[in-house]
Amino acid sequence: MLRNGDFEEGPYIFADTPWGVLVPPMDEDVHSPLPGWMVMSTTKVVKYVDSARHAVPSGAHAVEMVAGREC
């Protein structure tokens, strides 16, 4: 089992923001806003989204890779 496997705990998403919340890589912030998860690369950023405005596979929240060469 993964801690926070469905990304149910994470940063607050304001009701009027349809684009989600960007989660910075580990070199910008020592503490991750997603409990149990860290963005390890310096070139990648992930977006934390909710099911109200995005297609989420399971649960109420998910992450989307949005930056970096390998994404």
Image (tube, rainbow, N blue to C red):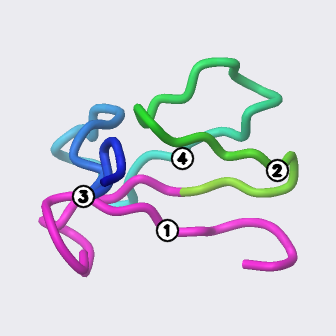
Q: Quadrant of residue 56?
A: bottom left
Q: Quadrant of residue 35?
A: top left
Which one is in front, 51 or 58? 58
**What's the CA distance linking mark 4 and mark 2?**
14 Å
Please identify, in this view, whether the residue under mark 2 or under mark 1 is nearer the observer: 2
Place of residue 65 in the rendered image (x, y in percent of width and height, measured from the top left): 59, 68
Left or right placement of residue 46 versus residue 51 in this view:
right
> According to the image, label 4 marks what residue?
22
Place of residue 54 in the rendered image (x, y in percent of width and height, measured from the top left): 26, 74
> According to the image, label 3 marks what residue?
61
- Tell me the magenta residue range: 47-71
**What's the CA distance linking mark 4 and mark 3?**
13 Å
Q: Disc 2 or 1, which lies upstream in sequence?
A: 2
| Residue found 51% across the figure and 42% down from its top | 37
Q: Disc 2 or 3, which lies upstream in sequence?
A: 2
What kind of secondary structure does the magenta stretch mostly adopt?
loop
Q: Is residue 49 magenta?
A: yes
- Amino acid type for the residue under numbered disc 4: Leu
Number of numbered discs = 4
Q: Is residue 58 magenta?
A: yes
Q: Residue 13: give its label.
A: none
Dot 4, crowdedness within 10 Å: few (<14), some or many (≥20)?
Answer: some
**What's the CA distance linking mark 2 and mark 1?**
15 Å
**What's the CA distance linking mark 2 and mark 3?**
22 Å
Give the vertical position of 33 relative to 17 (above or below). above
- Amino acid type for the residue under numbered disc 1: Glu
Dot 2, crowdedness within 10 Å: few (<14), some or many (≥20)?
Answer: few
> According to the image, label 2 marks what residue?
41
